[in-house]
Amino acid sequence: MYTGYDDSGAYCQEASTELDDDAHLLLYSGRLGVVVDAAGLYGGSRNLLPRMGSTAALSASASARDVYDALPAVEANITFETTCTDGTAETYVLGTSEDQFVQIGLVRQGHAVTQIIVTALEWQDPTTGDTYGPCNSFVAEKDPDGTNCNGYANWPCPDDYPDCVGFVQGSSWGKCYTVCTDTSVPELWLEVSMWGDSIALQLAWDGNYSLSSDCSGAITLNISGDVPFSSTTALLNSSGGDVLAFVAGSGGAISIDDETPEYQVIVTSSSGTVYSRNATRDVFVEVPSTECLKDTIARVMPFWEEAIVPDLRVGKTVFVAAHGNSIRAILKFLEGISDEDITGLEIPTGTPLVYALDADLKPMPCELAVPPLRFGRYLGDAEAIKAAAEAVKNQTKVG
């Protein structure tokens, strides 16, 4: 079960096999959930998103198994269709360029949004599995000079024949072959963004599909289930595009739209440069449900009075490590910050903030306090602290 940092400070813990031995990624916010099947594009039904929907009836202590079983089954059919004036038409389905699994990387996890990216995607013929584009008919040519290679820098292939094929350590040399370098098929990836009450599924591509002048194309995302959905984006001569499904949940029900009602969803990563997991196994990413500051204060201040104040009264120095919004609730109490100003106060991650209290546990003024703070002072370089606060602010920008 994945819940954040492990005890040694590493971000990704060992994946869990609590669900089953299939390569499933489960994202769960406490209200909504979605399952990404890393092997879902490998033959069969080609269903990358087998489960998605509301889990409002589950308790806060629900296990990954409970969440998985509670999510409604859906089918996500993603297709690329071309139609030409001579009456010919072809349909391709989403597949993977890997042997079996798509590649899944964690783009970011913050207190507002968790995002993953699914790469190694390509369009394939639904019957033969052949790849769309000129590389489908490409036949590699062997270096006529018979250059030996081992795939490493000490025995490289020439630039014209860069692919080393057939090297077996201690048994046989590899030989160098050409590779397909066609760029008419854009890079393709899927980004999944999870907020407390909504999910965005965005299939994006980074270039023009270079269709002939007598042909047109379109990419369609269909989701069948309790709430059916379909969205199509026509392929135009442009630098890229996307097709979007925005899933919102409230009171156990969901709605799906092809645009975001409150904020724009943007691709926050560069395709091909995200970090992939070492092995694709079950993973459980838990994102906090949406909570306003008023609710946070109501939850945090009883803990302040019952757990922190008694230690302060006997002269102890108390170290508080908590989520940014919980710290913000305490600062609003200590500093007397107004409702209007507190929402703009950014808490730099991992930066100590020190308060000196008098005998009545009232904060004492500090010349080193940075407005809107009057009593607390951060420990560390002022410019680094400012940059850290700005980084936290930018983390929640999604449009």
Image (cartoon, grey):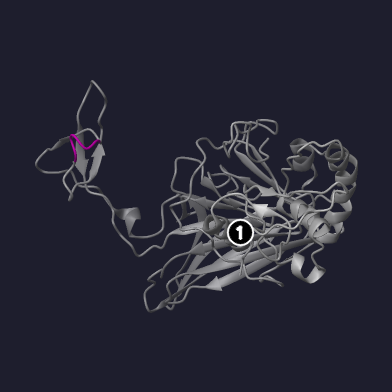
Height in image: 50 above or below 85?
above
- Nearest to the observer: residue 7 or residue 206: 7
Q: Is residue 150 visible?
A: yes
Q: Secondary structure at mark 1?
A: helix
Tell me the residue that label 1 is attached to: 389
Query: Residue at coordinates 21% horizontally, 44% vertically from top-left?
Result: 177
Where is 204 relative to 21, above or below? below
153 in magenta:
yes
Pick whichever, 177 or 365, lies toward us.
365
> Which of 41/390 is in front?
390
Residue 11: horizontal and vertical position, in percent? 58, 40
The image shows residue 264 at horizontal and vertical percentages of 63, 70
Q: Quadrant of the C terminus?
A: bottom right
What residue is drawn where x is 67% and y is 32%? 20
Between 395 and 183, the residue placed more toward the observer is 395
Which residue is at 63% across, 31% downward? Answer: 7
Q: Residue at x 43, y 53 (%)?
A: 272
Q: Position of residue 356 (x, y in %)?
A: 75, 48
- Amino acid on which disc 1 is placed: Ala
Residue found farthest to the left = 145
Instruction: Mark yes or no: residue 53 visible.
Output: no
Quadrant where the N terminus is found in the figure? top right
Overall secondary structure of the magenta section: loop
Range of magenta residues: 152-156
Residue 254: image location, x then y, percent: 79, 61
Total numbered labels: 1
Relative horizontal placement of residue 184, taking residue 294 as reference (left or right):
left
Q: Is residue 389 magenta?
A: no
